[in-house]
Image: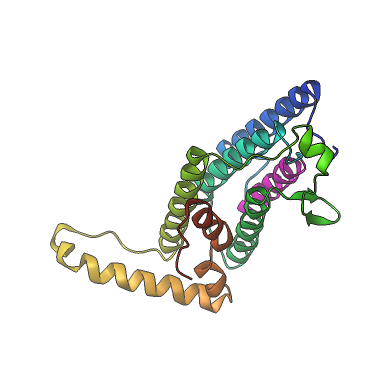
Amino acid sequence: MSSTRALTAAQERRLVTYLDDKLLELTRGYKKRSEENAVLPTLTLYLDAATRIMAMILQIPPVDPSTAVRTAFLLRLTHDVLASIPGYPADPITIPYLQDWLDDLDQAWSAVLQAQIWHPDHGVSDLVLSADEVAAGKKSSAITQTESTRLRSLLIGGSATIEEWLGGQLHRRPRTIDEEDEEEEEDMECVADVEGMLERLGVQDDYDQLFSRTLHQLGALSGFIPPT
């Protein structure tokens, strides 16, 4: 795909069909993860499959009208992956691998929000349009307010879900009715346990900065810069 030329209508149809099929395969693989002949029985295999889809999405040229296709499919992938992570068990190998993948997702969104070109061999580069191209109407539109709101919601909600999922791996015993007064204290203990686990694995700082690039850029787009 050319980086500075929008997809033709035929190319876009083929790409949309391809990505739809791959995302459906990812969903089917997740739903059948516990079956004997599962294709995606572990989180690492699931994330590997998601990485291949993300790489294809990022190669879509950030030039209108293809810009909207790139954003729409990355939103869809983000939703599907963040919703599926808690369906897998975590272990000391999986957690750092997941953190690396989430950082890749953060970098992917950073590139999309900046309308950057992504090449599988060379990484990101800025989109440069000549004066003639601009005069001819070629442009790269920013994401819409609706897309921005949805993305922020996905990332913040996904971060909270991942924290709960990590806490669940500590095998907290269920509360009884008589223990309701101790709920707040136990929640604080669980947070401390999660932080301790992440620190032992060497990824505490990384999880503290989860999606920091994207959230900062979303804040800049809306006129609000979140505190660092």
Write the residue at 23% across / 67% down. Answer: 184
Residue numbers of the magenta segment: 42-59
Q: Quadrant of the N terminus?
A: top right
Residue 52 lies within the magenta run: yes
119 over 202 or under it: above or below: above
Where is residue 95, by image quadrant?
A: bottom right
Question: Residue 3, can we see it?
Answer: no
Point out residue 147 in the picture as x, y percentages from the top left corner.
52, 40
Q: Which of the 4 quarters of the picture holds residue 49?
A: top right
Q: Is residue 191 left or right of residue 211?
A: left
Q: What residue lies at 66% left-to-right and 48% top-to-bottom?
A: 112
Count of marks placed on residues: 0
User: Viewed as shown, does residue 39 lie left or right of 155?
Assistant: right
Residue at the image point whose x is 71% and y is 40% from the top: 57
Image side of residue 97 versus residue 85, left or right: right
Q: Is residue 53 above or below residue 88?
A: above
210 magenta-colored: no
Residue under the point 45% across and 73% down: 195
**Does 131 sit left or right of 48 as displayed?**
right
